[in-house]
Image (spheres, helix red, strand yellow):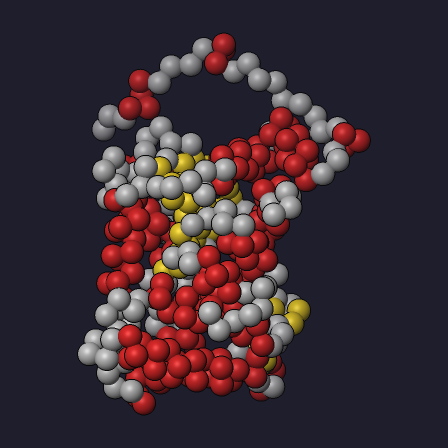
Amino acid sequence: MHSANCMVRYSRDDFDVPVEDYEFSKVSDVSSLIDQMGKAGGFTASKLAQSRDILRHAISKSRQNRILNWLSFPACLCATGTRGFFVEAIRRKAYNVVITTCGTLDHDIARTYREYFHGDFTLDDVALGEEGLNRLGNVVVPNECYGEILERVVLPWLEEIEEDRKKKDGENPWLGFGSVELCWSLGDRIEDESSILHWVAKHRIPMVIPGLTDGSIGSQLFMHRQRSPRFMVDVLADEQVLSDLIWGAEESHGLMVGGGISKHHVIWWNQFREEAGMDSAVSITTAPEFDGSLSGARLREAVSWGKIRPNAPQMVLEGEASLILPILGSDLFRQTS
């Protein structure tokens, strides 16, 4: 088996940037610390600095026409204060396409009306369950702060949404009603500025939920269907939104937090560009590569599929997102806006 890597040759002149020690007395803010991390190397620190630079360049273009900047992430982070990174990113229009999971809707709406609480990874799960307490990592979510409040809030909203849709098109009210329209309709009803849905709706940023039924909101949609049998979600409407965006894009960049369906939907659609692939990408993951999972797949693998361009700046940043994103956000979003 032959590989292009067999043809690679190096010389000593290829490596002329020396490793530098940290000088903490010169650290004035997070940005200057990340700058030093890029010079210090060893080992993930330099990756974080390079990721910052790639993301900064992409964000600088995100308000330009025909420039896509994708943001994908899993729901679990929205059960923590890391939701604030995504809220700030969307509020500032740093990203103009969002791909996430149904649980993001769950946690975003639930935390709008109730609180989640600090817990511990080592708590007794049987004892928690007996008290109606659910554990998400080291976060504790009481029943009344999740499913109960979602059912109480969302079902009446769905009735309102149905009335609005029928007024606009009595014959086929659900044509074009995908997760993008659902997120906007939900967000229009949330005034809390700490909500992701609030800002997605306010800025009319497309937020696609490929696995819309995999969560409590999916259950609310199903329960509404029992009351209104003709109710439906047009999942292919989301694909039309993404198709229109990708075919009209001159550039496409992205930050993918975690893996799974959200990450895959980003890179999947980018293979259909006229000149296939993303122009830059950063992936944050804790997953290993050896099991063949998408979560652990390095971005270089996506090059073979035409999902990322061969010469595109790219970085896989290994680490836990609730630690990494606040550091990146403190730099990327430090300017008032």
Reply above or below: 171 against 100: below
Q: Residue furthest right?
A: 25
Q: Residue furthest front?
A: 167
Question: Is 198 left or right of 217, judged from the image as shown?
Answer: right
> Toward the viewer: 75 or 252?
252
Examine the image and state in which quarter residue 5 appears. top left
Question: Is 132 left or right of 299, judged from the image as shown?
Answer: right
Question: Is 318 left or right of 217, judged from the image as shown?
Answer: right
> Toward the viewer: 276 or 248?
248
Residue depicted at 80% across the width and 31% down the height: 25
Residue depicted at 49% across the width and 34% down the height: 57
Examine the image and state in which quarter residue 81 appears. bottom right
Q: Position of residue 198 (x, y in %)?
A: 51, 65
Q: Residue furthest left?
A: 171
Residue depicted at 48% across the width and 73% down the height: 189
> Toward the viewer: 248 or 260?
248
Residue 290 seen in the current view:
no
> How many discs appear?
0
Q: Position of residue 142 (x, y in %)?
A: 59, 80
Reply above or below: 163 against 52: below
Quadrant (top left, top right, bottom left, bottom right) of the N terminus: top left
Q: Position of residue 113 (x, y in %)?
A: 58, 76
Residue depicted at 68% across the width and 33% down the height: 32
Examine the image and state in which quarter residue 79 appears. bottom right
Residue 110 seen in the current view:
yes
Reply above or below: 312 against 307: above
